[in-house]
Image: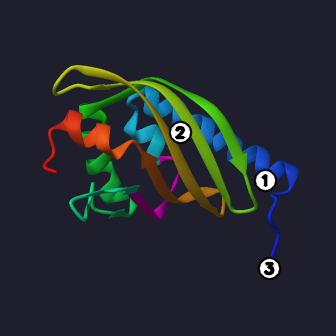
Amino acid sequence: MHGTLVAAPERAAAMRAAIERVMLARAAGDVEAVLAELADDVHYEVMGQIAGQPISPPVRGRVALRSHFKGLFERWVWNGMTVRNIIVGADNAAVETTGTMIHTVSNQRFQTDFCTVLGFRDGKISTIREYCDSFTIVRIAGLAM
């Protein structure tokens, strides 16, 4: 391995603060506050598949994410989720969350866990990879399997 695996304390604190702002904004359904923490060319992806196809296509760029997140925040409510752990590295972080989500279309509530892996560049989040209980998400959302 090459390079530094741990961020300097002040950089780690700034990354952690950005993560906390994003998680609070997501719980509040505040798309603009989430976007404020992202790089212009951010890459967002939900990891997991339905019958060999991505659950959701990858989205690139803050402009494209605005529309994607608006729809996502209308269909899913995260305000019952809490952060269990934040692990900060030199240029990336992992965020473990747990709690209750709501699918607004079906009004179903369910207990779940997420792991979000974030990449940072120049103080902004440049990559977001979400790992979730894809089986439950697909079942509740009524997506084809």
- The residue pinned by badge 3 equals 2
Q: Which residues are magenta?
A: 36-45
Q: Secondary structure at mark 3?
A: loop
Q: Amino acid at mark 1?
A: Arg
Q: Amino acid at mark 2?
A: Val
Residue at point 67% right, 36% down? 85
Q: Secondary structure at mark 2?
A: helix
Q: Crowding at label 2, few (<14), some or many (≥20) Cα neighbours within 10 Å?
A: many
Q: Give the mark nearer the N terminus: 3 vs 1.
A: 3
Residue at point 71% right, 46% down? 87
Of the pair 106 and 138, the residue shown nearer to us = 138
Residue 20 locus on image (x, y percent): 62, 35
Of the pair 15 and 4, the residue shown nearer to us = 4
- Residue 22, which numbered label? 2
Q: Secondary structure at mark 1?
A: helix
Residue extending furthest toward the right: 9
Q: Crowding at label 1, few (<14), some or many (≥20) Cα neighbours within 10 Å?
A: some
Q: Are marks 2 and 1 in contact (CB under 8 Å)?
A: no
Q: Amino acid at mark 3?
A: His
Q: Crowding at label 3, few (<14), some or many (≥20) Cα neighbours within 10 Å?
A: few
- Taking the image as shown, residue 119 lies to the left or right of residue 108, namely right
